[in-house]
Amino acid sequence: MDKETSDYLILQVILEAYPSFFVFLVTGVYWIADVLPPAAISLVPLACYGVMGTGYIQQIYICNEVLDCLGVMMLMAAVENSQVHKRAALRLLITIGCSHYRLSLVLFFSAMFLSMWVPNTVACGLLMPLVKALLQELEKMGIVDIYQTIENTEQKSHKHELSRPKPTDFTVFYFLGIAYSSSIGGMATLNGSQVNQIFNEYSELLFPKLGKITFPQFMLLTLPGVLVTETLLYIWMNSFFLNIFRSSDVAIPTGLTEEEARYIKTLLRNQYTQLGAIKFQDVVVATAVLLTVALQMFTSSLRLDSGPQRDVNMHIRVSAPTIFCVLLLFIIPSDLKFVKFFKKRNNGMHRRLPTAPSKACLNWTIVRDNMMWGVLFTVGGSCMSFEALKRSGMTAEFGKFLQLMHNWPSPVVALAVILFCKVLTEFGSNSCVVYAMLPEIASLSISSYTHPHYLMLAATLASSMAAHLAPSTPCLAMVSEYVHISTWRMMSAGVGPSVIAVIVTWFTVTLWSKVIILE
């Protein structure tokens, strides 16, 4: 490389990479400090990168993460407008009981299992109305409170929270639990997360001679760690929120006498009976939910022909099943009253045609009133920040920093990569982090004479477990907006999942991976 080319590259880094990194740092500090609502902070990269003249902003807001959030939130609005989630919640309480330990066990592991086959955003979004209905039923019986009363809320730390109710520990416990579990489950299979698909495509593209990692092989590699992580997460959440290992007043509602349990079960059965017969709208909405899961499983099993390129067609193809099912809900009527107009009267005449359209299972008024629009901006802003780092060349600078470790022992390098990617993914969508950093991690593997899958797998798994900030994953963005969980509450609750994820991922990469794919 001649001196002129070298000077040009240095100038490009100074004028593009570091200004993008500065915007990334400012946005990250704002998110941590919680000085504004996350949706408002997400406008910072939109404004700054727009002034800097980047030409890809319009592509970010039709990326897979945003489209998944849009589709699943519309589906959530349709579920909440029906009685599907109430019926499911009551049936679950009647079957399992009101013990928080049993309910959380079922919900957390259900979220984990579901996200193994569908995107974690879809898995978390479909369970959120169910959890809300469960808490509402428990609140009716006086077992829990969903939000704190004004008397119990002594301090308001942030101005933008003054008009928002503050969730209780029980509410935060359930919603953060399903969000974390949805992220954990996606690590178990190649099709469970876009992050794993990007890893697989990069492995085949950059190192074709190493051979393809098959679906059973990847699942055998990651599933033991996923089960261990989920079990430890369950223990941590129950310990942190419900004091499972300590006697405390907060644990009283989890232990009911046999007489109280029978009385509550009778109340629940009466409430279920009061819902009446299953309506046509409930059947349609439930079918749409099941169809969404089935189509997402089928779509995820298809190999992405475009490789690791984050193009618009790939995003639309991956998110299309959810959007398609939402479209069906806009079209299908909520009842069968329109059928009577096709019947003939006794005199052979048709009934008078209706003068108004039939009410659909989902309409725009419901979407407008229930859509969490701020989530779309939060997710889009986080994706934009990391896309700017890649396109400006800042991720290449990250790669140069990681190259300083090429003489270190492989387990130590793996731990450093895990920690580095774990920090990055708290500020950007995990798929964006993996898409941008895997080429640099692959370069580090070559320079350190380490098996490429060793470090690339470490980066992939570490990027899949964000636990502290709403912009880090759509799951956290949705639950934080849905029940108004504060940033500081998420950051404190996420300490345990982060430590668990780092330790389990390190053991998976350094020990278990050598048995499965690196022998």
Image (tube, grey):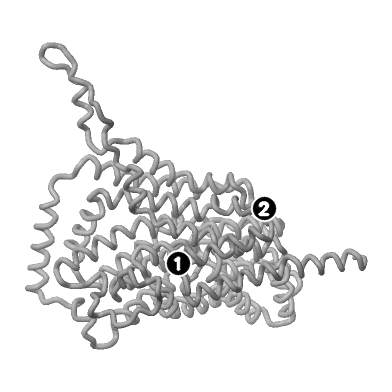
* Residue shown at the point (61%, 54%) measured from the top left: 57
Q: What residue type is labelled 1?
A: Ile
Instruction: Return the x and y of residue 105 as percentages of the image width and height.
Output: 30, 69
- Name, please, the residue furthest toward the bottom: 247
- Whichever of labels 2 and 1 marks the residue nearer the N terminus, that label is 2
Residue in front for this viewpoint, 410 or 153: 153
Question: In the figure, is residue 388 to the left or right of 368?
Answer: right
* Residue shown at the point (19%, 42%) measured from the top left: 279
Of the 4 image quadrants, the one containing the C terminus is: bottom right
Badge 1 marks a residue whose secondary structure is helix
Whether residue 445 is visible to the viewer of this picture, yes or no, is no
User: What crowding class fits label 2: few (fewer than 14 Cα within 10 Å), some (14-19), or many (20 or more)?
Assistant: few
Q: Name the residue under label 2.
A: 55
Callout in the foreground (2, 1): 2
In the figure, 501 relative to 216: above or below?
Answer: below
Q: Which amino acid does label 2 sit on?
A: Gly
Instruction: Return the x and y of residue 22 as percentages of the image width and height.
Output: 65, 72
Question: In the figure, is residue 384 to the left or right of 406?
Answer: left
Q: Which mark is residue 184?
A: 1
